Image (cartoon, rainbow, N blue to C red):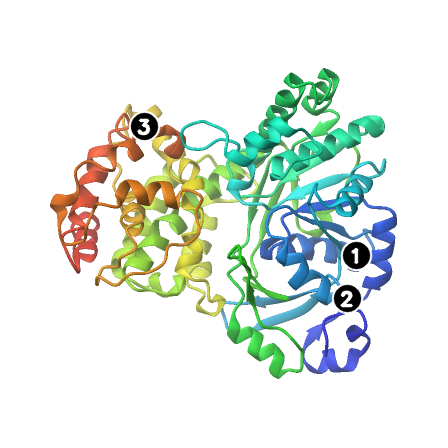
Amino acid sequence: MKLNYDGLKDTAAWEKAGIELPPYDAEALAKLTVADPRWAHFGVGNIFRIFVGSIADRLLREGLMDRGITCIETFDYEVVDKIYEPYDNLALAVILKADGSVEKSVLGPLSEAIKAQSADPKAWKRMKAVFTHPAFQMATFTITEKGYALHNSEGRYFGYVQADMDNGPEKVTGAMGIVTAMLYARYQAGKYPLTLVSMDNVARNGEKLRNSVIETAREWQKKNFVEQSFVDYVSDETVISFPWTMIDKITPRPSVEIANALEADGVEDMQPVITSKRTYIAPFVNAEGPQYLVVEDNFPNGRPPLEKAGVYMTDRATVNRSERMKVTACLNPIHTALGPYDVLLGYELFADGMSDPQLSILADQVGYREGLPVVEDPGILSPKAFIDEVIHERFPNKYLGDTSQRICTDISQGVAFRFGETIKAYMAKDGTAANLNGIPVAIAGWLRYLLAVDDEGKSYSLAPDPMDEELTEQLKDICLGRPETYEGQLRPILSNANIWGVDLYAAGLGEKIENIFREELAGPGAVRATLVRYLEK
């Protein structure tokens, strides 16, 4: 069986393999979507296909939507070449449940895939055709935290961002430049309304997206690339809206074991690929079953009935509380605290680290003891029930196969929200965050992880992170087994509010983190011994 339009015609073979097929005609849907686009998505990787794709699939199955999604990739164009085009943009969803059972289905809403390249006239023209279509309703995003960033840790534009600001909307290369260029095309075509929906794990994600778009537009206006009225257009949220959202679904890298099992069932060419930009992707996506999406209901040009597919449609305040619950307390901080220590202690799979006695205490401290007390109940989701599910059901799901190194990806881009917001909450409440214990242990662990040597002295490769080079350069003279090589190298890092959202020394935590980090340098076994000293009190 081949995962393409022709291959789906052999329905008996797919049924024998236990794989559910879409009841709608995915090929006909694609043609209709190209002719009359309503929904585009930026960032066409695993979380998009398994989560956003499944929402669209459910609406299509129930006759509540009759268009697919235009898929736009701004970063890793190999994904389009290797995973979309050879499979007619179809995806195979594999849901791995905690009891060991598996659900498999083909997703057909991913109707078109475009490489967002301004240097490619055909692709650029097609993107403009989508964005200038009057009935086009929304663009959604899963481009990770770093996709929205314009500035480096020193507050200056990244090189490619500066180039986008200098070269204008027809020569952009970065995601925010591309999005703003598409909005300019829509403005020129008729000032049509549109909704841009960030679905990334970023605090106030809609605000972050909006700020980056408006800043780009303003810089272009200063250089006479666009008119002031365009800046006004993207700044008016009754015309161009940027809803806030909270999204949650654990989606590991594709599993070779699952690929082999699918091929054993007769599905051809299922092996994962690793692109030159280190994207781990496959024709299938494996993920857990639980998923949450809370969206601010502000869509000036209309929208599909997302609430019919399990999406919580609500107001901005409720979204903000839900997002803060997850990102700053009940899930992401625990992930970020445990991931680096998993690697340091030799756990390849994240689920295995959940049974470690010290890491279990760390999860409890970061989540229950430190995060939960300062999080406001969003009303639609219970923080206590949410964190219970995370710690006792979702994270220990060994069938998910989520790796500890994946959890370490792009940590620098999220610590201001995952730890910084809780730190600021304690500063506001108590005047200091000095009484926190789990969070400083977690921060020290990530910095110790950046040395790329585990607790037994074995080296490993760091997970991708845009600040890896900068941070490792600052730490390069620190040696395991020689604590005296630590001579305050953490100070410029810990005091950098651009990283943490707050100066950690002003918060009362800087020296404590330095002490923990220094103790973890003592030699093999020092990480474990330090965890015991600081956590088992």
Q: CA distance from mark 1 to mark 2?
A: 9 Å
Q: Nearer the viewer, residue 18 or 530?
A: 530
Which residue is depicted at the point 72% across and 28% down? 240
Q: Does residue 66 appear left or right of residue 518 in this picture?
A: right
Q: Does residue 48 appear left or right of residue 37 in this picture?
A: left
Q: Picture coordinates of residue 87 (x, y %)?
A: 72, 67
Q: Is residue 193 visible?
A: no
Q: CA distance from mark 3 to mark 1?
A: 49 Å
Q: Quadrant of the N terminus?
A: bottom right
Q: Is residue 133 visible?
A: yes
Q: Nearer the viewer, residue 437 or 379?
A: 437
In which quarter of the view is residue 199 placed?
top right
Q: Nearer the viewer, residue 89 or 327?
A: 89
Of discs 2 and 3, which sits in the foreground? 3
* Residue 450 in the image: above or below residue 16: above
Residue behind mark 2: 22
Q: CA distance from mark 2 to mark 3?
A: 52 Å
Q: Earlier in the sequence, mark 1 or mark 2?
A: 2
Residue behind mark 3: 503
Q: Earlier in the sequence, mark 2 or mark 3?
A: 2
Which residue is depicted at the point 60% across and 27% down? 165
Amino acid under disc 1:
Leu
Q: Earlier in the sequence, mark 3 or mark 1?
A: 1
- Asked whether disc 2 touches disc 3, contact meaning CB atoms under 8 Å apart, the reply is no
Residue behind mark 1: 60
